Image (cartoon, rainbow, N blue to C red):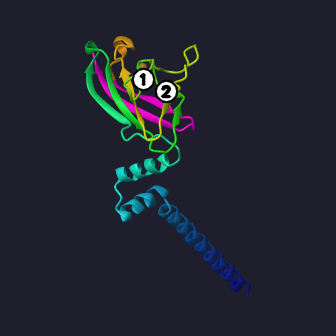
Amino acid sequence: MDYYLISKNMKDKNKIITFIVVIAFLFIGLFFFAKPGQNENNARKASNIPEGAQELANSHTAGANNTLTALETFYDFGTISMKNGNVSKIFKVTNSTSEDIKVPSLTTSCMCTTAYIIKEDGSKSRPFGMPGHGGAVPKANAVVKAGGSLEIEVVYDPNAHGPAGVGLIERAVFLEDENSNVIEFKFKVNVTP
Ligand SMILES: [Cu+2]
């Protein structure tokens, strides 16, 4: 009788352990299937939307919310030589809303990078640079008219960091509008002596 009871308890214990192991595997399985990145990719694949088109759609949605838009926000200067001096690239910013949008701020990520605002009439602003380093950053105070656009000229000085400034360099320019929406323009450059 005693023997029978012990044996029954052991059987119950085994059942409980089996149950716990099964539950644990179920949880591990759920964790892997629920990976958000994978689901997102699968959803994109399923709906046949190319990655770029999705981003474009997103930027247009943002445009409806009093936001400036830029179709091009990245540029690769390739390989340049310090001997040849500055290089520059112009990015276009469009206001596709029905209201004027003020642009109070234009800054760059490093002192080797300068940015200018070029208005539709062709006039060029003062240079804007990296915030900090003493003195307050002057406000940009530009306005992009409803349906209008302006250009941001980004100038990179490969000699700004001295002879050590060789190799692959990435910098950014930040254009902030009155609604605190920021467009980040990035560029890449490989600097040789
Ligand atoms: Cu720099």
- Location of the N terminus by quadrant is bottom right
Q: Mark 1 or mark 2, which has the lower sequence index?
A: 2
Which residue corresponds to the image point at 57% horizontal and 36% vertical from the top-left? 180
Q: Tell me which segment is drawn in magenta.
A: 168-193
User: Quadrant location of residue 94?
Assistant: top left
User: Quadrant location of residue 41?
Assistant: bottom left
Disc 1 crowd rating (10 Å Cα; few below 14, some 14-19, many 20+) is many
Pointer 2: what residue?
Answer: 106
Which residue corresponds to the image point at 39% horizontal and 53% vertical from the top-left? 54
Pointer 1: what residue?
Answer: 115
The foreground one among 179 and 23 is 179
The amino acid at mark 1 is Ala
- As displayed, is residue 169 above or below residue 163? below
The foreground one among 28 and 161 is 161
Which residue corresponds to the image point at 50% horizontal and 62% vertical from the top-left? 34
Disc 2 crowd rating (10 Å Cα; few below 14, some 14-19, many 20+) is many
